[in-house]
Image: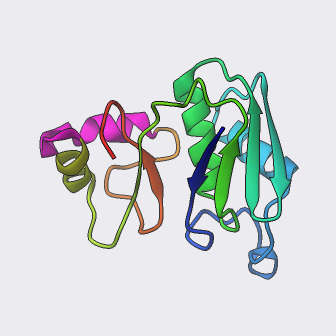
Amino acid sequence: MGLWNFVKDAGKSLFGKAEAAEAPKEDALKAELQDLGLNTEGVDLKVEGDKVVVSGKAIDAETKEKIILAVGNVDGVAAVETKQDDDTADAVFHTVVKGDTLSAIAKKTLGNANRYPEIFEANKPMLTHPDKIYPGQVLRIPGGKA
């Protein structure tokens, strides 16, 4: 079992302003994953308050990590828990803080600022541009260290 914490009020809003304080519903999260083009075959989502439980086995570890990030970086989600973490046991995530850039994160986690494209690629389709990150957002670090 794995548990990842997210900044509850920093993520993408799937609702209008009136509903933003509420935890997202499973169908809204599934629609978000579908919109991102992530393959959710074999994966189930369950919302428990402000926590999302991801169960089942994804097609690969990278896809499961992206599913965790995609639902975790939604407004109203404070944590994502996995029931089977054998495929995400080596996952490394980084929470963006004010002033972070992908280059700075790459230097800190991968040892070389010029490796920022690896982080950008590892976070597609959630990231659409290397400069469009925000404080509180959680990113995958491919082969990095926490």
- Magenta stretch bounds: 110-123
Q: Residue furthest bottom?
A: 18
| Residue 118 forms part of the magenta stretch | yes
- Residue at image x 41%, y 40%? 92
Residue 82: percent from left, percent from top? 68, 39
**In the visual, does 31 lie left or right of 27?**
left
Number of labels in the image equals 0
Of the 4 image quadrants, the one containing the N terminus is: top right
The answer to whether residue 140 is above or below residue 73 is above
- Residue at image x 26%, y 59%? 101
**In the visual, does 10 lie left or right of 35?**
left
The answer to whether residue 51 is above or below residue 113 is below
Residue 132: percent from left, percent from top? 39, 58
Label the magenta part by its dominant secondary structure. helix
Nearer to the camera, 26 or 7? 7
Residue 106: percent from left, percent from top? 23, 46
The answer to whether residue 18 is above or below residue 55 is below
- Residue at image x 45%, y 30%? 90
Q: Residue furthest front?
A: 1
**In the visual, does 77 lie left or right of 10?**
right
| Residue 144 forms part of the magenta stretch | no
Quarter location, residue 76? bottom right
Quarter location, residue 98? bottom left
